[in-house]
Image (tube, rainbow, N blue to C red):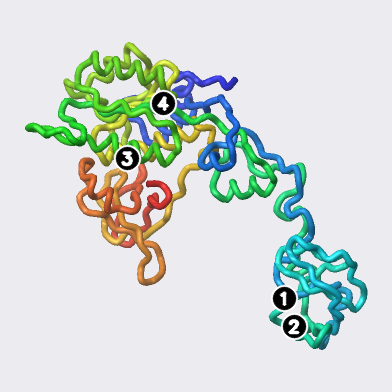
């Protein structure tokens, strides 16, 4: 059984820990040290395994391919028969097709017609593509310059018997499902689905279909979170909108902590008079930090409620997405048992100057595109306020301005996180 680190253990990795002014990379380290994978495993059919996390190494029980076979339509020959100059004339003695091998061995001066995927006839080691030969009746004329072993796929070239086909921790893709099927495996062991409960907080929030009163707004965060969580393939528990009162919040937190592996709230983690999250968390759990040196998303909490991990995201819509992608997403993948690979940055030239002061990480919405010279370039989507969700909808990337980075001049390179495959 995996032993989860305590929050004190996770915080202990930092020599200069300050929960009031935590750098992004330090917050990410604390979360990484604290979260552990769910342990329950179940077996599912291949068709149900997409996006599930493989629980143990999948070992190949066969060679794939099972025989040497042709990679092209053409003629199977013995390389020792081919001459270095001029043409080689060989007698065609049969045809091999996929699923119908040629039983006869190919001897000196002979060749076999062969189709893609067909087993190489005994005695042959090379395939000459049909486009470069000429035939006269049962004689095939092969030009010089053929490489021994060309256009032949070797037995076990894709997978060898007894070797790992897919490593544990892989989140299974369509290609993986095909690979599993090629081994004749009908079911695979996967980690159980991670259960994630989430809710929004705030008296001003209304659900779709309700009339808006003065000062009220529709709750967009739950729909954004639902979409982001759906992309991860977790089991989603939508707990709706929780009003701004301590008892309602405590009830929601307790239920969420008892029913889920992770709890995500949006709003209520700043220092306003109506933000009761700190008060409730003091009763139900523990918190490692409340603020991060970043923009947007400075008020963000991470801790635990019972056995569940807790992510207290800000209330502003863009800040919700930024904190989810740069903190919660990777943590949830680790909890799913996935081998969490931090998303790679695309390096691009900034089309305009961007103002920034060192000492915090900034995430700005941008449009990444290919310039006239073929290089990547990026421009911001306009207003960067944390409540301007439209600018996130129009963007195709996040421009990341790192903690120690200063202002960026037009033409200077910046790191970008592309949305393709993410949002």
Which residue in the rendered view is the most extreme toward the front? 100
Which disc is residue 133 wearing? 2
Which residue is labeled 4 in the image?
262
Which callout, 4 or 3, points to the residue nearer the camera?
4
**What whole-number distance in Å separates the C-alpha atoms at marks 2 and 3?**
60 Å
Residue labelled with disc 3: 321
Cβ atoms under marks 1 and 4 closer than 8 Å: no
Q: Residue at x 72, y 63 (%)?
A: 117
Mark positioned earlier in the residue sequence (1 or 4): 1
Percent across and percent down for residue 385 are 21, 44
How many circles with numbers are drawn on the protein? 4
Query: Badges 1 and 2: C-beta atoms under 8 Å apart?
Result: yes
**x%, y% of residue 113?**
78, 74
Asked if disc 2 and disc 4 are in contact, CB closer than 8 Å, the reply is no
Q: Is residue 41 above or below residue 356?
A: above
Q: Earlier in the sequence, mark 3 or mark 1?
A: 1
Spatial CA distance of label 2 from label 4 is 64 Å
């Amino acid at each position: 059984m995996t032993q989860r680190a305590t929050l004190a253990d996770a915080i202990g990795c930092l020599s200069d820990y300050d929960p009031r002014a935590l750098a992004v990379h330090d917050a990410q380290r604390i979360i990484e040290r604290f979260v552990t994978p769910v342990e329950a495993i179940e077996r599912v059919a291949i068709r149900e395994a997409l996006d599930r996390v493989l629980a143990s190494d999948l070992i190949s029980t066969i060679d794939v391919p099972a025989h040497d076979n042709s990679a092209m339509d053409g003629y199977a020959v013995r390389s020792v028969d081919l001459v270095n100059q001029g043409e080689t004339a060989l007698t065609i003695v049969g045809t091999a097709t996929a699923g119908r091998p040629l039983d006869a061995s190919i001897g000196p001066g002979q060749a076999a017609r062969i189709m893609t995927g067909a087993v190489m006839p005994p005695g042959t080691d090379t395939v000459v593509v049909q486009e470069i030969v000429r035939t006269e009746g049962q004689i095939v004329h092969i030009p010089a310059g053929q490489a021994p072993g060309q256009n032949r796929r070797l037995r076990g070239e894709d997978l060898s018997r007894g070797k790992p086909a897919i490593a544990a921790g892989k989140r299974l893709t369509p290609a993986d499902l095909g690979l599993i099927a090629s081994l004749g495996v009908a079911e695979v062991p996967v980690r159980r689905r991670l259960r994630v409960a989430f809710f929004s907080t705030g008296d001003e929030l209304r659900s779709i279909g309700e009339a808006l009163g003065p000062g009220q707004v529709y709750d967009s965060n739950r729909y954004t979170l639902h979409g982001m969580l759906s992309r991860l393939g977790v089991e989603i528990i939508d707990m709706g909108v929780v009003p701004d009162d301590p008892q309602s919040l405590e009830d929601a937190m307790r239920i969420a902590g008892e029913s889920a592996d992770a709890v995500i709230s949006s709003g209520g983690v700043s220092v306003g008079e109506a933000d009761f999250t700190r008060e409730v968390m003091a009763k139900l759990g523990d918190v490692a930090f409340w603020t991060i040196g970043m923009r947007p998303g400075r008020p963000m909490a991470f801790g635990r409620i019972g056995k569940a991990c807790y992510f207290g995201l800000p209330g502003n819509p863009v800040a919700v997405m930024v904190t989810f992608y740069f903190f919660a997403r990777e943590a949830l993948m680790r909890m799913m048992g996935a081998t969490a690979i931090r998303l790679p940055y695309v390096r691009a030239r900034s089309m305009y100057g961007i103002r920034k002061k060192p000492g915090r990480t900034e995430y700005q919405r941008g449009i990444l595109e290919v310039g006239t010279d073929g290089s990547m370039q990026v421009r911001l989507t306009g207003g960067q306020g944390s409540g301007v969700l439209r600018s996130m909808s129009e963007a195709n990337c996040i421009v990341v301005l790192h903690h120690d980075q200063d202002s960026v001049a037009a033409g200077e390179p910046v790191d970008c996180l592309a949305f393709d495959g993410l949002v």
